[in-house]
Amino acid sequence: MLTRRFFFCALALAALAVSPAARAMDDDVPSFRKRGDQEKQFVTKVGTAIVKAARIKPQKVGLVSHEYKMNTPKNGRAELLLKMEYYGLVTKKRYTTDIVVKLDTSEKDTWEVLSIEYSDTNPSPVDANRKKIDDLVKQFNK
């Protein structure tokens, strides 16, 4: 009886510990539907969220450059081209990333992310986490 009670208490505490972390991660992910007027801040948050999803504990993530390509391949579509940098946790080396965020811009104030392409210069045998990057599409569209 005591073991069972201990198990359920431990399970409840674990659930409480995980939920704030999940909410904190959601707070770090900006929404393309509410991007506002601070363009550089917004694209820095977008790029940082993508790099953090792609790699395990990147350090000093920063924006190098960004550019929008409008109406590609057709009207109402755009691509956000991001060049980011980060440093490896273990190696402390600088890596650069090329990110293409494909957007549906047909609604002026509520853009929608269609897909994200990611590549970086990290020679790690562990590739970027594609599942986490794909999950960001849903979060960006909130």
Image: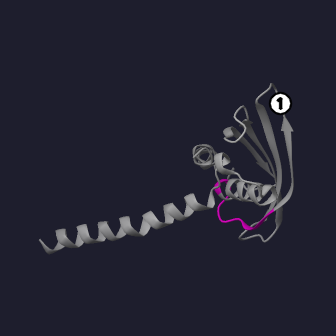
Question: Residue 76, how many percent across, how many down?
Answer: 76, 29
Q: Work out which residue is located at the far top of the displayed protein and give it.
A: 74
Which residue sits at x=83%, y=30%? 71
Question: Residue 70, how many percent across, how many down?
Answer: 84, 35
Screen quadrant of the N terminus: bottom left
136 sits to left or right of 97: left
Q: Is residue 122 visible?
A: no
Q: Can residue 98 be seen in this view?
A: yes
Q: Is residue 60 above or below residue 51?
A: below
Q: In this view, does 31 lie above or below 64?
A: above
Residue at which label 1 appears? 71
Q: What residue type is labelled 1?
A: Asn
Q: Does the magenta stretch include residue 5?
A: no
Specify the segment rendered in magenta: 53-62
Q: Does the magenta stretch include residue 59?
A: yes
Q: Where is residue 89, by image quadrant?
A: bottom right
- Colour scheme of the rendered structure: one colour
Q: Where is residue 80, by image quadrant?
A: top right
Which residue sits at x=50%, y=66%? 21
Question: Residue 74, how many percent across, how many down?
Answer: 80, 24
Judge the density around disc 1: few (<14), some (14-19), many (≥20) Cα neighbours within 10 Å. Answer: some
28 sits to left or right of 63: left
Q: Helix, strand, or loop for circle 1? A: loop
Question: Residue 47, how many percent across, how many down?
Answer: 74, 55
